[in-house]
């Protein structure tokens, strides 16, 4: 705990320096802006300086704020969160702020096969760890495709449409899925999946069926993977994630000895987001703002216990 | 004439469609039963090895081992009707899971690699049988619902479609095992 306090103090020091730097630049740009503003006022032939002064003040201030927020975000993730997670979750917890789950793995999960394949793919905040010897990796990912459409004037336009934006998780699964089993939120209204003649599997749990649709080409394999207890646990996890602010859109797939899970971004923002107010807040970081980051990670780590992935069913 | 043909053709097409639907569902039940059959036969292959591995360690479980062997032989030799067969298979599942649970009492057996391998294979097989049983029951539910619902019930009566039997878990298996009693 003392180590965490020391870490928070060090970050708080950096934050205060950045706040002071932002204020300093604000006054520099304000003075320069005002000087030019009044120059333009007193000398009408140089009246364009009024606009110039306002421009320097606004652009300079915004740039200094954005720049300092960028520096704060870097320090927050690369020095503070990295160390905080190591202290909280142990040595085998690896956090890479600028890395993410690879696109091949995202595509191989087949969770979004019913949508166009990604034209643009990015992410951040990769975490590699293990819980009770179950390997787990997750990160935020953003997959988009380019859509062409015609506007109201009949002109051809392009826009980026989200395929998925949120936390993408890959975990070891204790059973071997010989054929893929895909569990989609049932409001996706997928009529058919375009690969391997997947059929909808109707399962016995009415509450599970209320939230999810299951697709597989093998009815028995789907039931082998989705035991009655796993279905109940998935429903419980779904409810818990919803309570914690995730959108009610959770996707699962089981392929080989891996489980893929995709949780759409929270309504409050992205995974491990460093909001602007964290830099400018009057409250010190000591007041526990960092606890929210631990809770976010703990929710994802809880997948292992919530779904009982660590239960060795063979012994 | 054409009107008369249409009047006759439409009901005939409806009857054919409903008949085909019932046949399709009955076939789905047969397919699901065949899948269970494959897994059950795989389990029969594991039993002799399992019994041979444990009998030297588990002298107190001689009765259970004998009963398992008897049931296996009976199920392999006699072609029982599905309902009766599934009941006997349920009893066999119960005895095997009891055997695996009691094995916890025998440290030497637990350390035996051959036994560990058999235990894993058998547990996986039980999981697959359970999944196949659920798939079979889902197919039976679809089929039996069609037999009971209008208008397929009329076609079912005319062509004598019989309801299929569910694969029910025996009463003893549904109860949570009394672990204390097993370890006495």
Image (cartoon, coloured by chain):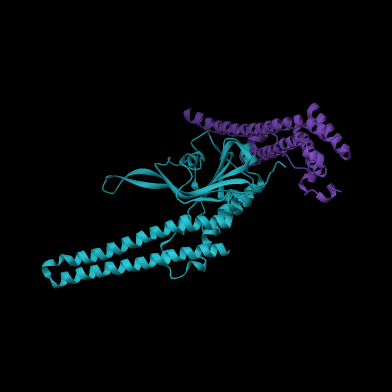
Chain colours: A cyan, B purple
Work out whether residue A232 or residue A213 is closer to the camera in this orientation and state it. Answer: A232
Q: Is residue A81 above or below residue A177?
A: below
At which x and y percent is residue A266?
48, 56
At which x and y percent is residue A44?
12, 70
Judge left or right: residue A103 versus residue B70. left
Judge left or right: residue A231 versus residue A71. right
- The N terminus of chain A lies in quadrant: bottom right
- The C terminus of chain A lies in quadrant: top right
Q: Which residue appears at 50% of the width and 64% of the height? A: A8
Q: Which residue appears at 76% of the width and 47% of the height? A: B174
Q: How many marks?
A: 0
At which x and y percent is residue B78?
80, 27
Q: Which residue appears at 83% of the width and 32% of the height? A: B69
Q: Is residue A236 above or below residue B138?
A: below
Judge left or right: residue A217 versus residue B2. right
Work out whether residue B109 or residue B142 is closer to the camera in this orientation and state it. Answer: B109
Work out whether residue A230 or residue A189 is closer to the camera in this orientation and state it. Answer: A230
At which x and y percent is residue A120?
39, 43
Q: Is residue A289 visible?
A: no
Q: Is residue A244 above or below residue B182?
A: below
On the image, which quarter does residue B26 sit in? top right
Q: Is residue A39 above or below residue B86?
A: below
Q: Is residue A93 visible?
A: yes
């Amino acid at each position: 705990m003392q180590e965490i306090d020391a870490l928070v103090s060090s970050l708080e020091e950096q934050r205060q320096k950045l706040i002071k730097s932002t204020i300093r630049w604000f006054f520099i740009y304000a003075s320069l802006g005002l000087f030019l503003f009044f120059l333009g006022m007193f000398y009408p032939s140089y009246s364009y300086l009024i606009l110039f002064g306002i421009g320097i003040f606004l652009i300079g201030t915004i740039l200094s704020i954005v720049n300092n927020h960028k520096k704060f975000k870097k320090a927050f993730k690369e020095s503070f969160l990295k160390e905080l997670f190591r202290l909280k979750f142990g040595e085998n917890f690896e956090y890479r702020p600028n890395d993410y789950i690879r696109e091949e793995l995202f595509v191989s999960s087949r969770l979004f096969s019913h949508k166009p394949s990604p034209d643009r793919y990015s992410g951040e905040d990769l975490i590699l760890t293990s819980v009770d010897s179950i390997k787990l990796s997750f990160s935020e990912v953003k997959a988009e495709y380019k859509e062409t459409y015609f506007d109201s004037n009949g002109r051809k336009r392009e826009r980026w449409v989200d395929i998925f934006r949120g936390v993408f998780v890959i975990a070891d699964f204790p059973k071997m899925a010989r054929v893929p089993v895909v569990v989609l939120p049932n409001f996706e209204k997928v009529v058919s999946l375009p690969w391997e003649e997947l059929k909808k599997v109707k399962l016995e749990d009415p509450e599970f069926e209320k939230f999810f649709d299951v697709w597989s080409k093998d009815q028995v394999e789907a039931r082998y993977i989705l035991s009655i207890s796993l279905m109940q646990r998935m429903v419980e996890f779904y409810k818990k994630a919803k309570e914690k602010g995730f959108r009610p859109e959770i996707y699962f797939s089981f392929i080989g000895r891996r489980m893929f899970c995709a949780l759409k971004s929270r309504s409050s923002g992205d995974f491990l987001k460093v909001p602007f107010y964290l830099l400018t807040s009057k409250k010190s970081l000591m007041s526990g703002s960092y606890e929210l980051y631990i809770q976010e990670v703990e929710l994802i780590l809880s997948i292992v216990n919530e779904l009982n992935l660590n239960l060795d069913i063979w012994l | 004439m054409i009107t008369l043909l249409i009047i006759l053709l439409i009901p005939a097409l409806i009857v054919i469609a409903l008949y085909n639907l019932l046949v399709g569902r009955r076939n789905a039940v047969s397919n699901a039963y065949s899948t269970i059959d494959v897994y059950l036969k795989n389990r029969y292959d594991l039993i002799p090895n399992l019994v041979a591995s444990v009998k030297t360690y588990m002298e107190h479980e001689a009765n259970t081992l004998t009963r398992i062997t008897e049931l296996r032989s009976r199920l392999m030799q006699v072609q029982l009707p599905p309902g009766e067969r599934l009941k006997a298979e349920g009893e066999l599942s119960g005895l095997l899971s009891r055997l695996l649970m009691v094995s916890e009492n025998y440290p030497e057996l637990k350390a035996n690699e051959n036994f560990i391998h058999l235990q894993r294979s058998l547990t996986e097989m039980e999981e697959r049988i359970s999944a196949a049983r659920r798939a079979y029951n889902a197919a039976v539910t679809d089929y039996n619902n069609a037999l009971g619902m209008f208008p397929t019930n009329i076609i079912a009566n005319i062509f004598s479609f019989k309801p299929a039997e569910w694969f029910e878990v025996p009463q003893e298996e549904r109860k949570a095992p009394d672990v204390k009693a097993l370890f006495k």
